[in-house]
Amino acid sequence: MFKTVLFPIDRSPESREAADMVAKVVKTHHSKLVLLSVVESLEAEDTPTTLAEQEMASPQAIAELLATAKSLFSNLGIEAEVVERQGKPAFTICDVADEISADLIIMGCRGLGLTEEGVHDSVTNRVINLSPCPVLIVP
């Protein structure tokens, strides 16, 4: 049913928790797994303020993250393809899903978009609204 599963990852605990669900879905459906991480392209006025934001703007940190995730899935008997892109996360996730003809996107949710003020800034909400395929959100 799900031939290709896209798993966008970052350094959040929610992303790590979603990895269990990804492994279950991929094993159950014998899916191809594509791991994606996005080096965030920041506007001149957008300076990363937290360590996590600084790391997600670093190509070296993204490469390490993808290598670690690929190794984690390999230890579970799952081969994964890795994709690293630069851009705005939600748009890049949807673009890659379209490019690889993903049947499902699985991602963790930080809960930042659950308030009226945060709903427009939520990567998860944007992916749900723009995705070319179903999206499974792991709370």
Image (tube, rainbow, N blue to C red):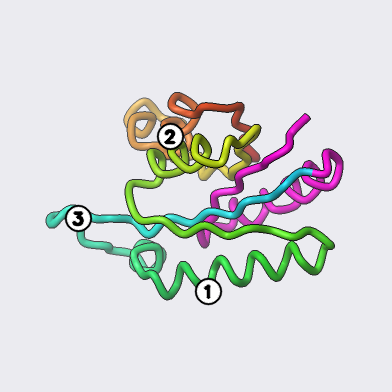
Q: Which element carries disc 1, helix, strand or loop?
A: helix
Could you say where residue 103 lies in the image, as x and y percent from the top left? 65, 32
Mark identifier at residue 46 = 3
- Looking at the image, which residue is at 43% across and 27% down? 130
Camera-side mark, 3 or 2: 3
Mark identifier at residue 113 = 2
53, 24: nearer the viewer: 24
- The answer to whether 88 appears left or right of 36 in the picture is left
Could you say where residue 44 lies in the image, as x and y percent from the top left? 13, 57
Could you say where residue 71 lies in the image, as x and y percent from the top left? 70, 70
Q: Is residue 10 magenta?
A: yes
| Quadrant in which the C terminus is drawn | top right
Identified by mark 2, the residue type is Gly
Whether 51 is drawn above or below 89: the answer is below
Disc 1/disc 3 C-alpha distance (Å): 24 Å
Residue 139 visible at all: no
Residues packed near mark 1 inside 10 Å, few (<14), some (14 to 19) or many (20 plus): few
Camera-side mark, 1 or 3: 1
Q: Mark 1 highlights which residue?
A: 64
- Discs 3, 2 touching: Cβ within 8 Å: no
Q: Which element carries disc 2, helix, strand or loop?
A: loop
Q: Is residue 75 magenta?
A: no
Q: Earlier in the sequence, mark 1 or mark 3?
A: 3
Camera-side mark, 2 or 1: 1
Q: Earlier in the sequence, mark 3 or mark 2?
A: 3
Q: Which residues are magenta?
A: 1-30
- Looking at the image, which residue is at 69% across and 53% down? 19
Q: Earlier in the sequence, mark 2 or mark 1?
A: 1
- Looking at the image, which residue is at 60% across and 31% down? 135
Q: What is the total number of numbered labels drawn onto the structure image?
A: 3
Identified by mark 1, the residue type is Glu
Mark identifier at residue 41 = none
